[in-house]
Amino acid sequence: MDRVGATVIGRAQRSNHVGDEAIKVSNFIVRKIFILSCIGCLLHHDLNAKESLRDVDQNSNVVQVSIIPEVKNIEPSKPFWVAVRQVIEPGWHTYWKNAGDVGAPITISWSLPEGFQASQIHWPYPQRIAYGDFTNFGYHDDVILLTEITPPETLTVSQVEIKADVRWLVCKDVCIPEQANLIAELPVRTHEIFDGRYNRMFTEARLKIPRQVPIKVYSNVEEEKLSISIELPGLRANRVTNVSYFPSSAGVINNSAAQSFSVDESGIFLELLADERIDNTSSSFDGIVVIDEDVGGGLTSSFVIKPVHSDDLDVGLSFLAAIAFAFLGGLILNLMPCVFPVLSIKILSLMETARGESLKIHALVYFSGVVLSFLGVAGALLILRAAGAEVGWGFQLQSPFVVGSLAYLFVVLGLNLSGYFEISFSGLGGGYINFPKSGYAASFLTGVLASVVAAPCTAPFMGVALGYAITQSDTVALAVFGSLGAGMATPYCLISLIPGLLERLPRPGVWMVTFRQFLAFPLYATAIWLIWVLSIQTSSDSILYVLGGLLIIIFSIWLGRHCSNVFARIVILGLSVFIAVVSLSSLTSVSRNEMSKEDTSVLSYSEEVLQKALNQGPVFINFTAAWCITCKVNELTVLKTKPIREAFADNGIQYMEGDWTTENPKITKALESFSRTGVPLYLLYPKGKKKARVLPQILTESILLEAIDDL
């Protein structure tokens, strides 16, 4: 009897399983048929646009569409906003950029005068809409779609026409494709005037656009569950009534399943039913989160999120550990070749003033210059990231203008140390003072300069600490960057403040003249290296302009030595600075894809190329930059050596390079996925595996060969 019962139950379970699979297949087929039907309707609608518009106007009138500029007139080169407004009949809905299970998003095709540029649609957050057995993402009632339009710098006409071809699918019990051709005419004036009638409408529309804020978001997929952790400290759990996640692309979650959430003092935790097509390592979980709070009459806020896979992060790193790692990284920065030229100047200054009474103040001023500079770079980094820019540590050296400026600066400092001229801080008319003895201002500026040239270097411990910093609050991030600066400034300060260490310094003498002149050569070498970086970032014509500007600067210095008139010196200095700025302003970045590569066997990084390469064999990825000295030292002493090349060949390892010399958002995103803000980053992937081994930032042949043996 028991055996019979067991058999019957087993059959029932198998039958239910088959039924579940049949339901999944039928839902999939229905979904595809629906989408294909919508596409067919839209295509038919395109071919019969006038007839369809006439039918919609006379019969359906489901959606009333209008175009509303925020301004009454436009000004050359000044961006302005245009709203496409949809007023939807009750019970009907249109669709968000990710329509959900079925449907099609609203599209706007702009016809603009020559030179005008239109942004992508700034989508307001959607609603979850149940539609039969499906769940869609879209809008009811009234929706405002904002687009920013930028005119060219010059306009010769007195009036312009802004045209928009708007197409949408509107659904209730049935779905109807609709279209509207909209026109806005705007006069051209020298001063822009806002249309006050729509101030409230535009203000409310902007409040519904999800904000881009630097928040820490993790994701993980396990047993058909997608977990998303969002660090939003300050939320009150008793006020949060609902949290909804809307993925930017299809195939991430089961849209119809309930979204479970919890809120505590650290933020929000979402648990979602994953789509059967999801991939924990390659799928993108970017999207938005909408939070409803019970505050007064109700408050809804929304954020753009870009989750990082939690398996790739050291999520257990504490604040104190990050501070300690940053401090150690700052200490080691003093040994990096990119910092040595400037540090050598400060050491020379210390030797000459070691017996002075104000040495302690000089040390504190130098410390302030270093720390404040790191905080300034951190502040700029956080502001740019909050604005949506994909930037990381060393981002300023992705600008050819900055690299060229530093090259000029190092040449000038080198000429100073060579004795060709001296820098005066007491007036251009006389009283020339040697740069290393030029007072507290020089100590502060030396700290600033040391911080700027340290940007290309990534010392051990720095990568993890800075990766932690940019995913935390601004206060925590600034504290970590400040600790990095403090670590870099500490060795000089210790020598200055501890009497026992001072006594070990050599006494000043004639030998220091020769030593001073010797220290000019690291500065010249740094300038040569920076010009080489420019040759990679820009074209050969741009290098000609830079070298021409350098010649003018040297000529101006020579001319200043032979001119005793104060006014003439000021004119010469101003003219040389102007010519230098003009020379550098001619620099334009060249995409690395446009540059010829000497070694055709080197794969250029992209997610698509990586996935294809992994199917063929192991892959080693070198995320590097021409301005990163640490990267170049590793390449010269390890990656380009014969034993490593032979090991790559013997094991069928494909070499891939992610070049970050110029700005590349895709590489920035790849670095962030491994909790890194800068280069170098070295990854070794086994064949067919999507989990990489992260290698140390300071490579040796033995470390890399051991990793290869472990494949």
Image: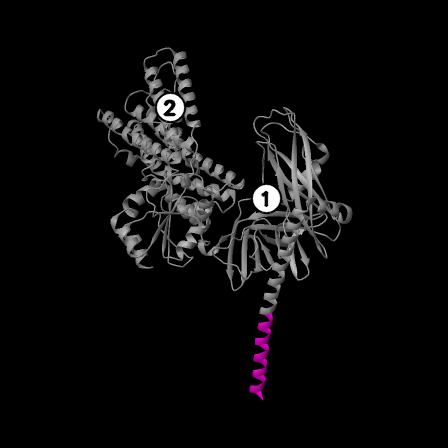
Residue denoted by label 2: 549
Q: Quadrant of the N terminus?
A: bottom right
**Number of other residues with Cα within 10 Å of mark 1, as a class: few under 14, some 14 to 19, many 20 or more:** some
* Residue with the most extreme top position: 565
Q: Would you call the spot at circle 2 few (<14 residues within 10 Å), some (14-19), or many (20 or more)?
A: many
Mark nearer the viewer, 1 or 2: 2
Question: In this image, 10 relative to 369: left or right?
Answer: right
Q: CA distance from mark 1 to mark 2?
A: 43 Å
Report if residue 550 lies within the magenta region: no
User: The C terminus lies in which quarter of the figure?
Assistant: bottom left
Residue 153 against residue 250 in the figure, above or below = above
Q: Earlier in the sequence, mark 1 or mark 2?
A: 1
Q: Please tell me the numbered disc located at residue 179.
A: none
Magenta range:
1-20
**In-front residue for pair 640/289:** 640
- Asked if residue 652 lies left or right of residue 142, the reply is left
| Residue type marked 1 | Arg
Residue nearest the observer in this picture, 155 or 189: 155
Q: Residue furthest bottom?
A: 1
Pinpoint residue 94: horizontal percent, then vertical percent. 68, 50
Q: Main secondary structure of the magenta part?
A: helix
| Residue 230 point in image, percent of width and height | 55, 52
Q: Quadrant of residue 569?
A: top left
Q: Which residue is mark 1?
A: 211
In reply to whether residue 13 is colored magenta, the answer given is yes
